[in-house]
Image (cartoon, rainbow, N blue to C red):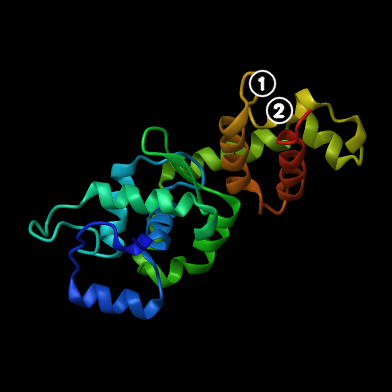
Amino acid sequence: MPSNQHGSIACNRHAWTSLMKRGFKNHELVTLAVFFAGGDARQVDTEDVAVKVNELAPGRFTWRKYRDQINIEIVRAFLSDAKKKKYGSLLLGTGTTGWQLTDVGLRFAQANSYRAATPAQQAQRLSKDERRRRSHELGRVAASDAFQKYAAGQRRQITRREIESVFRLDDYVVGEARIKKVQRLLNVLGDDDEVGDAVRFFALLATREQ
């Protein structure tokens, strides 16, 4: 069964026509919903993604019989699709732990968000608290020993422990959990003019096997 045929999806005709013209597939829409729900900086619950994707595409993910109710299982299915390599590896996560964007998913969302949302929806993407958290993270990384050495051209003197401190890691954070934490900060600061180059450099070292 093709990915975009999960279950019975009711659809508002106008929304369907408009979005199909824009060329979005269902796994792309849920990826955009993760982005608008703040999934570049934190893990987002499936329920929050469902609400957001219904705002972006009203009726597209609701029950056929009960059009005012979002089909959470359909949303979860397409979120799982968005993790798969054949659909671009746009997301990380599960229905239990929550969802966040990969580097590829973030680039996709940033390039396409204006096509999927109104200017008002785009402006609402980051809450005051989220902007405060980003500002705090920028200050924290800029003040870190790892960044100070990086900025002074002393890359070879940066220790693994100093790099792990940037991402709040320790020896017990391994596998996908480590990748998620690194990706979260990479999504937030990877394109920052001040620390972005350093964060990308640190991310490569933090996820490299010892």
Q: Quadrant of residue 30 in the image?
A: bottom left
Label 1 amino acid? Asp
Label 2 amino acid? Glu
Name the quarter where the N terminus is drawn.
bottom left
Ranked by sequence position, the earlier of labels 1 and 2 is 2
- Residue 167's x, y, as percent? 65, 32
Whether label 1 touches label 2, CB < 8 Å: yes
Query: Residue at 12% across / 61% down in the picture?
Result: 64
Out of 16 and 111, give the one closest to the viewer: 16
Q: Is residue 63 above or below residue 186?
A: below
Q: Is residue 104 above or below residue 15?
A: above
Q: Quadrant of residue 210 in the image?
A: top right
Task: Judge left or right: residue 57 versus residue 39.
Answer: left
- Residue 105's x, y, as percent? 53, 56
Q: Which residue is mark 2?
A: 164
Out of 175 and 43, give the one closest to the viewer: 175
Number of residue marks: 2
> How crowded is the residue under tag 2: few (<14 C-alpha within 10 Å), some, or many (20+)?
many
Query: Residue at 21% across / 77% down in the picture?
Result: 14
> How crowded is the residue under tag 1: few (<14 C-alpha within 10 Å), some, or many (20+)?
few
- Residue 154's x, y, as percent? 92, 36
User: CA separation, marks 1 and 2?
Assistant: 6 Å
Callout 1 secondary element: loop
Q: Quadrant of residue 67 in the image?
A: bottom left
Query: Residue at 41% across / 48% down in the picture?
Result: 80
Q: Which residue is mark 1?
A: 170
- Residue 86's x, y, as percent? 52, 59
